[in-house]
Amino acid sequence: MEEYQLKRVISTLLTLALMISLTACGNSGSAGNASNSLGSQSAPASIDTLKLGTDYKDLKANLKFITNRTDVVDTTYKQYVLEFQKLYPNINITYQADTNYSDNMTTRLTTNSWGDICMIPTTLKKDQLSSHFISLGKKSALETTYQFLDNFSYQNETYGLPSTSSFSGVVYNKAVFKKAGITTLPKTPDEFLSDLQQIKAKTDAIPLYTNFAAGWTMGAWDAYIGGTATGDPDALNKLVHTKNPFSKPADGSLTGPYAVYYTLYGAVSKKLTEADPTTTDWEGSKNMINSGKIATMVLGSWAIPQMQQAGSHPDDIGYMPFPISVNGKQYVSIGAGYNYGINKFSSKDNQTAAMLYVKWLVENSNDDTLNGGLPTVKSHKLPTFLDAFQGVTQLTDTPAPAGEEDLFGNVSTGSELSLNADNKHVQSIVETAVKGSPAFDSIMDDWNQKWTTAQKKYNALK
């Protein structure tokens, strides 16, 4: 009897051990569909140490990728998956696109089970990153390989890698410039206006197309008033404290915010733009610059591929630095676009598979430069359309100091200018330039008064 009872006890213990083991395997806390089956390989500690095609080559996972790119989710991204699966045939990636991405993704993050990879919403504060995403590695280690990591790094941990970066210049048609006899790209506002005058005289192209009617396209001009126009990565942080920041610099140079808006006013007042700004057509303008009916448009680098793909002359589309020089040097402000982030609540298998795919996207797909950006990998060459930026100093805007994170936005909104957030103040420059009054300096004086009022309200004057 005792022997029988002993066997029952042993049998019961073995059964319980097996149940515990099965429960542990099944309860992975995963937001995805893969079990934890890394086998002899542990989860990667840093994305830069992964060896694509060698590490985790037998890993199985099903990933969900939430993206803002509704335009390519069924085309380009499907091709990316097929290319990636040549290395990892057992890792499946399903894309899900969202037209109202930033707002909806911010809400979805609170569920923890939204998927495995997303473009990190810019609404998140840095101290919130670790609550939603895994660290991809130490910033101090990753920045030897990758660039533009500041936006989504916190306390030396990096939670996102840039899908692309954006920078500010001028889209132009090289064939039109050649026809006009322009052999050297302009480096100052007055040189640019002179070139536009030459284009008007020697070609049938519209020298500068404002895209006034679209509205949002005019907001691009605000992107040049910081490092590009000053050579100072801290320019915007200083702007919020500066007295009369829209005045012409005391040394008489055409730099700073004054020079940016002076360029637009001058082009319109000299009739170097479309005849009637209210009739511009954004979609139609893409083919017009591709075919040589437009010479220049002031837009971010994201516009380059759109202009190239809009007609049969992609090689005629060029991109030049914005025509401002500071003490003889040109600068361009660089900003990272959406960053890839990996769900903290996905299974270890899915996190590892997601790391492999993000690494492949950043290092092998060329998606960053195909979208008009700079490469995330430092060793990658600049795309050929950026040849004009050789020798131009790249700057990344300095983040606002602690305690002033909202100050620029408050002053900008309080002044009713809403820099980098609205386009009405830029459109007003076009409207007044068409009429010929008030004079440009009068506009800048008005902006200074409004800015000063807002500075006083938020105690920003120093």
Image: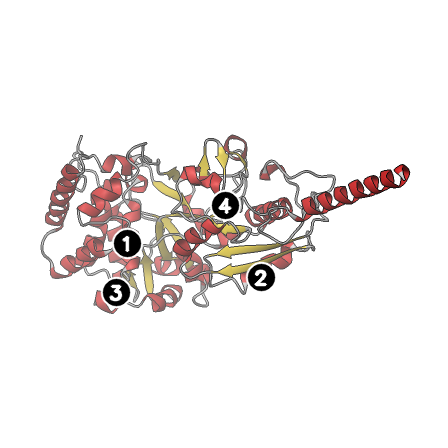
Question: What's under tag 3, amino acid-wise?
Answer: Ala
- The disc label shown at residue 213, or none: 3
**Of discs 1 and 2, which sits in the foreground?**
2
Q: Is 397 located above or below residue 418 in the figure?
A: above
Q: CA distance from mark 2 to mark 4?
A: 21 Å
Q: Tell me if I can see residue 53 in this picture.
A: no
Check disc 2 and report its element: helix, strand or loop.
helix
Check disc 1 and report its element: helix, strand or loop.
helix
Check disc 3 and report its element: helix, strand or loop.
loop
User: Quadrant of the image for the C terminus?
Assistant: top left
* Nearest the eye: 56 or 372: 56
Q: Earlier in the sequence, mark 3 or mark 1?
A: 3
| Colouring method of the image | secondary structure
Name the residue rendered at 22%, 49% in the picture: 261
Q: Is 140 located above or below residue 371 in the figure?
A: above
Question: What's under tag 2, amino acid-wise?
Answer: Lys
Q: Earlier in the sequence, mark 1 or mark 2?
A: 2
Marks 1 and 4: in contact by CB < 8 Å? Answer: no
The spot of residue 35 in percent (x, y) is 67, 49
Q: Quadrant of residue 124?
A: top left
